[in-house]
Image (cartoon, helix red, strand yellow):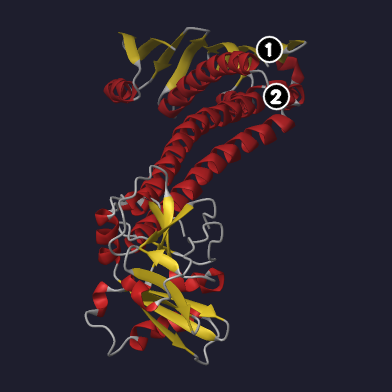
Amino acid sequence: MGNSKELVLVYKGMPKVSLEERFSIVLTPQNYILRRENLPIKQEYQSKKIVSSIFDNFIEDKDKYSFFVYKEDEDWIFIAYKQEEVIELLEEAGIPSSNVDEIFFAQQMVSTITKPISLGKNNALVVIDGIATVVPKSILPEDTVYENIIEDIHPKKSVPLSNEHSYIDTKTALIFSAIFTIFAIFFIIEGMRYTHSSQKASTKVEEILQHYPALESSYKRESILAKYSNIDKEQRAKREIIKKLSKLINQNIKIEQFELNAKTYSAVLSTPNTRLLNQIKQKVKANGMQITNISSNKITIKGHL
Amino acid sequence: MMNIRYKGELIVLASIILVLSSYIFKYKSFESSQELLHQKQQEIVQLQDVISLQKIWSPNKISQKLDTLKHIIPSQQIIWNKRGKKLTVKFKQIDSNQLNKILNKILNIAIQIEYINIKKEQNKYTMELKCKW
């Protein structure tokens, strides 16, 4: 809890302090109201719930106060203080509040205060019945020896000085942070899903290659594909020509001649009924083939594959 | 508790950095996975094409399947010359039904037709076929 930080006791009318390093402050009862209560409460969060009501009839404008609770022996110590007052006090002492890390209360140090601590010319901090109290020096014996605050002993608990440099309070920041974190989780999950989907495709390729190890080389695959694609294209074209011609042939239309090679084809169709020639012509054209010659009862078809 | 300056802003900034980093991770994963996915999908399509084309045009037992052509017409009407994976065959004096049967048969066998010549002489046909597999 920042135990290495210097402790500065702050009080009204304190001399100007020049400190460059960050430090912690100890407030005197001049700046806080304290109540000690023996309550059947075990947990700190329960005491925090009732802290406001503890100061009913003691303070007005509770909204302006901050509260601090801790357990001292069997009692609960409730402290109310005004952050604004603390900041004003620090400004008066020439201390930049931005350099203050933690706030402690003199009450937290009662066990270490064995002698009065001087608070300027007129006042002193003493412990009366276990309560840190500010008293006028005039009521203390003249030969009173004052001690300084023990800087090495830092109480366990502290409160931060109001974060006046933040435009976003911690609660709002945490809400934003939670929302952004949820988005971040979604993005990470989505990103992992994308990675997984591409891995799935890689696995499928590997599975195929396990069955066909000869196709592992992409050059070999391309060469096989090129070879068989040409064969496939050429052979499908040849079969298509034969099928088209077969459709044209019936009892009245006969094939006289047909030749098919690597690049071209030709066919001669004949009919005993010359009136059917027009019908054959239409069918040939409908099948996308070209007529090169028509004689009395014959039609010659030629074409390229 | 430490009194950190701009604590709220720092928390929000850290979470913004987190969300931006995770968005960049998602975007980069998307880009690289799409690229890889596209590449792998192309590879799969290519492999499937190669495998199916190989299966179509390099099947087994072509030779036996071609031998069934001999049963369609009497052997004296056939001149059969098969060497390795090449066949030259001439069917003589076949009628139109036999011609149809032969054509249907060869169209359904995955052979590479190189040459076909059909000639009608009177009412009979002569058919010459050169093919390989």
The reply to whether discs 2 and 1 touch (Cβ–Cβ < 8 Å) is yes
Disc 2 with disc 1 on a shared chain: yes
The label shown at residue B29 is none
Q: Is residue B122 visible?
A: yes
In this image, B53 relative to A17: left or right?
right
Drawn side of residue A225 relative to residue A107, left or right: right
Q: Circle 1 sits on which residue?
A: B89
Res B124 quadrant in image? top right
Of residue A295 and residue B51, the one placed in the foreground of this image is B51
Residue A121 position (above or below residue B102): below
Task: Point out the tag, 2 or 1, that comes first from the N-terminus.
Answer: 2
Query: In x, y percent, where is residue B30?
Result: 45, 37
Instruction: Sort mark 2 into few (<14), some (14-19) or many (20+) by Cα contacts within 10 Å.
Output: some
Real-space CA distance between mark 2 and mark 1, rounded to the nearest whole angstrom: 10 Å
For the point 64% across and 22% down, which residue is it? B57
Which residue position holds label 2?
B69
Amino acid at dot 2:
Leu
Q: Secondary structure at mark 2?
A: helix
Q: Position of residue A76 (x, y in %)?
A: 49, 83
Location of residue A275 by image quarter: top left
Q: Chain of mark 2?
A: B
Task: Compare residues A92 and B93 and report the one nearer the observer.
Answer: A92
Q: Hey, what amino acid is under mark 1?
A: Val
Instruction: Indicate the position of residue A160 as horizontal and vertical percent values.
Output: 40, 61
Residue B16, image x, y percentages: 37, 46
On screen, B124 above or below B32? Answer: above
Around disc 1, counting alpha carbons within 10 Å, would you say few (fewer than 14), some (14 to 19), or many (20 or more)? some
Residue at the limit of the structure toward the front, as seen here: A143
Q: Nearer the viewer, residue B46 or A201?
A: A201
